[in-house]
Image: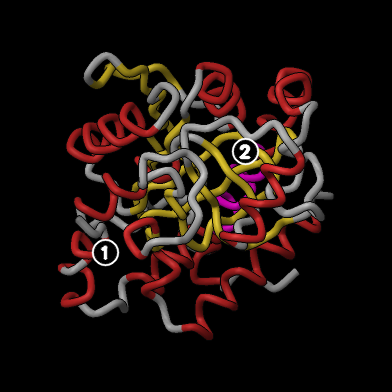
Amino acid sequence: MLPIPTFFRARQTEVLLRILLICPIPLEYSVCRTALALRDAQGVLGCRTARGSAGSVDIMAIETGPAKARAASATIAGIDHFQPDLVVDTGTCGAIDGELIVRAVVLGLSCLEYDISGNGLPHRIMQEMRLPSAFDFLPRREAQKLVRMLTELAKDRGLHLRAGVQACGEFFIQSASVRDSLSALSGAAACNWESAGVFVGALRACIPPLSLRVVSDLGDEDSLRDFRRNARKCSQDLYRFVRDALESGWFALFYEQWKSVPQGQVDKMPQRVLP
């Protein structure tokens, strides 16, 4: 594994940043709360929240409810309440790439809101569907270095990490043929119902969004059964990995790189959500 700079190890008791973790469903929120040893906190607009810290990071987790509208509204409310430096979209996802396996962690380098056309699965990709993650604003070399570091950390924990596009649409993928069609069209690694809402809320608030999700099913005819069977164990793997990334200083290192992004680019983040 690539070493974490000693700068971060030496300042473990000093709060370097604040992170808002977005947890869509009760199971994911509860597992996150347990894995990160968070404490119940004041609710935000009817959403449960929990607070705590890991290493040099102050954390708030918020349970948004499923799908994009709930995710977007809770993300905006959480940002207003907590004033985070980073927003992290978390939870389970279905594999779109046929080579992904259950328990693989997907680092979303961008989000593709594939159902924005209103016609279910699209026939073409529109520019309005594309939403950038915080990686898109970093110099390529630094972004690649951060991806390699997180990949090595996952490997050390016995997990496979894939960096790629996280597709988002309120359409449950439970057919291998549909999955393969979406994969061929979009090049996405995985899909879920909430990431687009999280990204829209964060980008419009000029807060950098990241996405870390775990594969709980393979997008085939057994998807619903597999999700029910795997969601808890996969979520435990994910949030333990998030905890390890927090404690290792990876998020702090990411934020140090983010602070070098020109203010003019930060101010234009809302424009990346096309009308």
Q: Is residue 91 magenta?
A: no
Please determine whether, in this image, residue 107 is positioned above or below residue 90. Answer: below
Residue 272 tag number: 1
Q: At 19% across and 59% down in the image, what residue appears?
A: 270
Picture quarter with the N terminus: bottom right
Q: Amino acid at mark 1?
A: Arg
Magenta stretch bounds: 240-249
Q: Nearer the viewer, residue 110 or 81?
A: 110
Q: Is residue 248 magenta?
A: yes
Percent coordinates x, y for residue 98 in the rendering: 79, 52
- The image quadrant that residue 134 belongs to is bottom left
Query: Is 21 on the left or on the right of 227, as rendered?
Result: left
Percent coordinates x, y for residue 196 in the rendering: 39, 45
The Cα atoms of the two marked residues, 1 and 2, are separated by 24 Å
Q: Amino acid at mark 2?
A: Cys
- The image quadrant that residue 163 belongs to is bottom right
